[in-house]
Image (cartoon, rainbow, N blue to C red):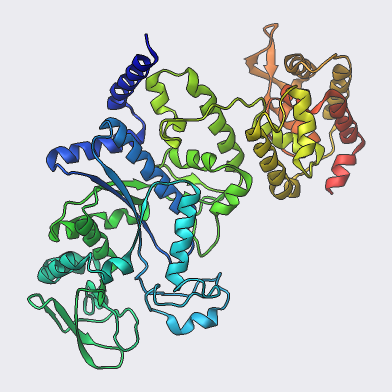
Amino acid sequence: MTATASVEDFASDLRQAAETASAWPFEEARKIIERLKRKPKDEVLFETGYGPSGLPHIGTFGEVARTTMVRHAFRVLTDDRIPTRLICFSDDMDGMRKIPENVPSRAFLEPYLQMPLTSVPDPWGGEYASFGDHNNAMLRRFLDTFGFDYEFASATEYYKAGKLDAVLLRAAERYDDIMQVMLPTLGEERQATYSPFLPISPSSGRVLYVPLKEVNAKAGTITFDDDDGTETTLPVTGGHVKLQWKPDFGARWAALGVDFEMFGKDHQTNAPIYDRICEILGGEAPEHYVYELFLDEIGQKISKSKGNGLTIDEWLTYASPESLALYMFQSPRSAKKLHFDVIPKAVDEYYNFLARYPVQDVKNKLGNPVWHIHAGNPPVEELPLTFGLLLKLASASNAEDKEVLWRFIGRYAPGVTAQTSPTLDKLAGYAVRYFIDRVKPRRAFRLPDEVEADALRRLDAALAALDGSDRDAIQNAVLDVARPVPRYQDAKRKGPDGGPGVSFAWFSALYELLLGESEGPRFGTFVAAYGIPETRALIARALSGELAKGAA
């Protein structure tokens, strides 16, 4: 069989497996295909939204990454026969309702409250034309850093350039229909003043939330009292008005012909409103995907104003973008805690999935997250150590730089260097930073009790009798020390002689006593990497009380 034939066979197998693949991006992609059967189109448009009242954040990454995964699944299912586009739409014509905490001078922005974000001056030195333009530039830089394939769209540019004029005129014509959708969703007081159109005041430049005196569908105008009390008439076109955010959702879908958009669960109750307004304005509501919101470590919803969560920069300080993409891929419809402690697990899970990929059949490849993270072309990586093990080595050695870790790596995996494994070198750097910032301040060593002290002394003797760094021999020695100790026996687990196995309490005790933590990798692997002499020295420090005293 020729190489070309082999590639063609794999492509054929891939298409067939994709038809029934259960990964959620394929499920969403198949919905888009069914949509096209009802209403054929020359291209499929994916959209994500961004509110530039603040800088791009981890949720922004999640929306674009997840949408990109669905887009790629669609392209595979359709053999890339139908062109696709991804628009990242910035709602930068929204009024600035409050002044962000992170600007250089809050007083500087006070006069610009309620003005469109692209009419508010740039508070960071004037490099950009406006506050909105600054945050838009940060969004594009943010997305470009991750290599996303997208088109940027500015609401201000779309409104002012007339790209939304047709749908705005239609909104004036069908004003009563829109109001029939919106009014039942509002309280009595707001019903009296509500309008889907928000005029931009000619006198103050502010986005006005005022009742309308008249909507002239034939002329395409609205009449209202301006900030200065003057009765004013403006066209709904050309950027003189914008739509309230709920009607704006549906109007944008209708104007652009959006086929797919995902949003957080906080939008779920409003989705039927967006859909109905899109239909009123002559469009077909896109396929939706509603994802769960993130929680902090105590289970509270993450809030930008509270700052109770992780920023994108914080994640990337300690781990790669791929590990974050994995976290976004897994169970988007389940509430997940997003805090520092999830990072090490995400890193190791990513490399575990990557290691499995080459030996999987086509069906399982399509269910492997790395296929979606890397658009069907995952890299080949073989790492001799896990990130979790690197963290424990950093903790045991109090590493201040990654060169300390490389001394252990070189012993554990002879021939592996920073040059031959740049990925491992990056992981070593991440591990040291995570240890210094997140582990070291929280370590809690304790003194061993009598049972633990006796077990540690016997472990020290067992390690002294070993020759070399065979991780399995070390692990067996560690288990043998614990087997006769009633505290560490587990009747649910069987030992080699048919008696009780060793409970996890033994390993928790080892990590608490020697590393000041309650969890860790396989202990035999840790000792093999850290070194038997070094581990025995650690045991001596635990027995003498030095470790616990240092923590105190």
| Viewer-closest of 534 and 233 | 233
Q: Which residue is drawn at 69% across and 8% down?
A: 496
Residue 544 location, quadrant: top right
Left or right, residue 422 beside residue 202: right
* Residue 21 appears in view: yes
Query: Residue reaching furthest left?
Result: 218
Q: How many numbered marks are there?
A: 0
Q: Which residue is drawn at 37% across and 19% down?
A: 7
Left or right, residue 227 beside residue 179: right
Query: Residue reaching furthest bottom?
Result: 229
| Viewer-closest of 15 and 528 | 15
412 in relation to 61, above or below: above
The percent position of residue 64, horizontal first and vertical second, equals 40, 48
31 in relation to 5, above or below: below
Residue 28 location, quadrant: top left
Residue 333 location, quadrant: top left
The N terminus sits in image quarter: top left
Query: Residue reaching furthest top?
Result: 497
| Viewer-closest of 217 and 333 | 217
